[in-house]
Image (tube, rainbow, N blue to C red):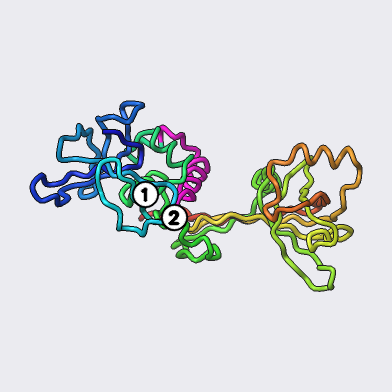
Amino acid sequence: MHAHLGDRLVVESPSTGVVRRDGEIIGLHHEDGTPPYDVRWSDTDDVTLVFPGPDAHVQHLETEADDTPSGTGTVGDDTAVSRTSANPGDIGRRVAEERRRRGLSREETARRARISPQYLAYLEEQPSDPSTATLFALAGALDTTAGSLRGGGVDRPPGQGHALLHPRLNDLDQEECRRLLSTHGVGRVAVTAPDGRPAVVPVNYEVVDDAIVFRTRPGSVPAAAAGDEVAFEVDHVDEAMSQGWSVLAVGPATTVTEPDAVRDLARRAHTEPWAGGTRDTWVSIRPTRLTGKRITPADPPARR
């Protein structure tokens, strides 16, 4: 018997062939995939070390969809079946991003979710679709929801969570605003478009020598920022905690034309523009005003 991380171990009745128990293989003890396995059982969510007997077989998980309709394959040892999911593979990227955002190592996240670090690495690096139990365990370990890890709500605007019972709205100082702007990310620039209408467009940005810089195309809406005073805004909302922050930078925008400066910006860029295509016009914003707000829970009232 050979298995891979993410496969299912199925235990059937020897006489009737009815599935008595099944679970997700979340840990291997041998590189060749031979038993024993760490299995998270679907009926109890318990994780146990299993030495499969003659009534057990492996149900392999295909990471690529095939032409076989779901549910029509024959189940047996070394038989591949498909398991459908909303965006399999995206789950791993969301898990990795949430883990990094919270400053957790793979080992600590795996310990909290009761899975092996090797299985967590597999989830983060390969197109995979973990079981519902494992997804909930990961969500609990990362203090988020299974729906968020699956991408539910990716098309919803932020801020639909419940308001805090005792919110506190604080002004941010200049140093904190600069720290939150960080070195790169996605922000929004407010400009007057070439047709004379106001527009707010998202751009990938960098912070270089206290200037906010982004790449675009000549004649585009973001390129219209050059030559004017513009507003640039970055924010973050934590839906689960109903809190977040916002930073607003205002200042003159110019097009970077000096060849050495353009090459230096391209060399130091962390990411390619999400919009794709050739975008080699750099626009620089030098903030003359930097303000920000943060909303957090207020201290609970003192008991008398």
Q: Residue at x 32, y 34 (%)?
A: 27
Q: In the image, which residues are magenta?
A: 88-108
- Horizontal arrangement in the rendering, residue 185 relative to residue 40 (left or right): right
* Percent of width and height locating residue 266: 78, 41
Mark 1, residue position: 135
Q: Mark 1 and mark 2 in contact (Cβ < 8 Å)? A: yes
Dot 2 amino acid type: Arg
- Category of crowding for the residue at label 1, using alpha-carbon neighbours closer than 10 angstroms: few (below 14), some (14–19), many (at least 20): many
Dot 1 amino acid type: Leu
Q: Is residue 159 above or below residue 274?
A: below
* Percent of width and height locating residue 169: 57, 58
Q: Secondary structure at mark 1?
A: helix
User: What secondary structure is the stretch in magenta mostly built from?
Assistant: helix
Mark 2, residue position: 150
Q: Is residue 131 above or below residue 163?
A: above
Q: Residue furthest left?
A: 15
